[in-house]
Image (cartoon, rainbow, N blue to C red):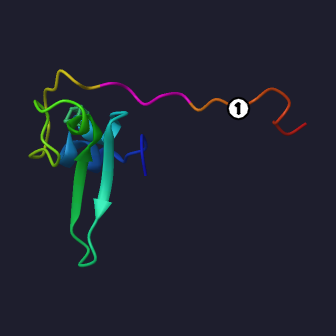
Amino acid sequence: MKGVSRPNERQRVGLCAGCAHGHRVVSAKGSEFWLCAKSDTDPRFAKYPRLPVLECGGYEPPHPVTRPHGSGAR
Ligand code: SF4
């Protein structure tokens, strides 16, 4: 789940848990990893950063969810 994290997860994962580029990956055995999508375009970023990430120059807050006009409930 992107952009949503519980307080414990924030402590364990660090910045990636709330970053637009962070993606939680769960293996078939149930192990959890955080994938940094920024690593696709910038070699300075590890694909699977060592957690917790406490400082990162690539951190970006999650993008807000936008909905087209007229799609909301009345
Ligand atoms: S840019 Fe930094 S904070 Fe964001 S997912 Fe990658 S390593 Fe984590």
Give yes or no for residue 58 being in the magenta stretch.
no
Q: Is residue 40 above or below residue 12?
A: above
Q: Residues within 10 Å of mark 1 (few under 14, many from 20)?
A: few
Q: Is residue 29 above or below residue 44?
A: below
In this view, the residue in front, 12 or 22, is 22
In this view, the residue in front, 29 or 45, is 45
Give yes or no for residue 63 being in the magenta stretch.
yes
Disc 1 target residue: 67
Image location of residue 62, percent across then percent down? 42, 31
Which quarter of the frame holds ligand 1? top left
Image location of residue 23, percent across then percent down? 33, 48
Q: Quadrant of residue 15?
A: top left
Residue beneath the point at 16% across and 26% down: 56
Residue 44 appears left or right of 35: left
Where are the magenta residues, as a range?
60-64
Q: Is mark 1 within 8 Å of ligand 1?
A: no
Task: Specify the quadrant that holds the C terminus.
Answer: top right
Q: Farthest residue toward the bottom? A: 29
